[in-house]
Image (cartoon, rainbow, N blue to C red):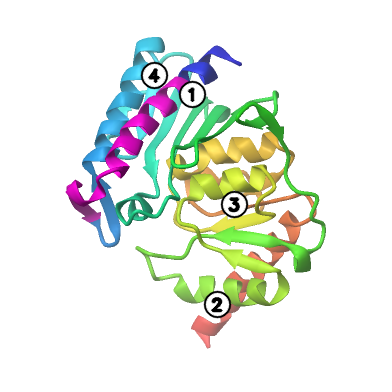
Amino acid sequence: MHPALNIAVKAALRAGQIINRAALDIERLQVAVKSKHDYVTEVDRAAEAAIIETLSEAYPGYGILAEESGIAAPTRKGGFQWIIDPLDGTTNFIHGLPQYAVSIALAKDGQLQQGVVFDPAKNELFTASRGAGAYMNDRRIRVSRCQKLGAALLGTGFPYREFARAEEYLAILRQLMQHTSGIRRPGAASLDLAYVASGRLDGFWEFGLSPWDMAAGALLITEAGGLISDVSGESGYMQSGEVVAGTPKIFPLILKTVRDGKKLSQETSFA
């Protein structure tokens, strides 16, 4: 295991211990509202602090982009930056729904190098190093062999903060509901992407994500043989927050449907 990945795993496991302890007594959690339908708890902050402490001790010169603290340190040493979500799926967590994860990625000059997604509730650790494949609990993982959209199980994330593009999303959802074997919305994008990488889902799309939601999962998918892009089919998903991912056969079919849905919603809005 790459030394930086080993440290990221150590940080993720440490955060997972904090989350698991808190999950035993959720009723005592102090929950704050960051914005409409967007929550943060003292667990998010404690987990993030533990992650940053672990990473910074090992790599003091690396930049940090973390959900709760923003850019905690500039990218200055070799262009390296840690991208952290200490608890992806906070809404699930505060409701006792065991679908949430710790997500940590390392980028160099914007190119993803290491990725960890840890599900503390199920004790599932997904890891990837650039050029070295993707793993779950030390077992090599690959995207599924699904080749037909009609047989595909897809994941997505419903709009919950910004509703200006709701019609566009519904147009896409309507098409994919009719032409796939099913759609799932578990509520933690990092895990959804890890599930694409491990073959549990055949594809995924969502709008309005942040870099920390996608970074580690994106590397998992590419290292597992999958494809991921923004809605235009380019690599700007970390900047746009719009992501489409899937197996090599399913990915272009989802991408076309997403594009068609976007076009249809625009035409409808102009009518």
User: Is 22 rendered above or below residue 186?
Assistant: above
Q: Magenta region's main secondary structure?
A: helix
Residue 270 at x, y = what percent?
A: 51, 83
Question: Are the residues at dot 4 and dot 3 in contact (C-beta closer than 8 Å)?
Answer: no
Marks 4 and 3, how far apart in space?
Answer: 29 Å
Which mark lies nearer to you, 1 or 2? Answer: 1
According to the picture, the residue beneath numbered tag 1 turns out to be 9
* Residue at the (59%, 51%) spot, across then down: 230
Residue 204 at x, y = what percent?
A: 61, 56
Marks 4 and 2, how far apart in space?
Answer: 44 Å
According to the picture, the residue beneath numbered tag 2 turns out to be 265
Which mark lies nearer to you, 3 or 1? Answer: 1
Give the magenta-colored segment's residue range. Answer: 10-34
Q: Amino acid at mark 2?
A: Ser
Q: Is residue 239 left or right of residue 75?
A: right
Which mark lies nearer to you, 4 or 3? Answer: 4
Label 1 secondary element: helix
Marks 3 and 1, how far apart in space?
Answer: 28 Å
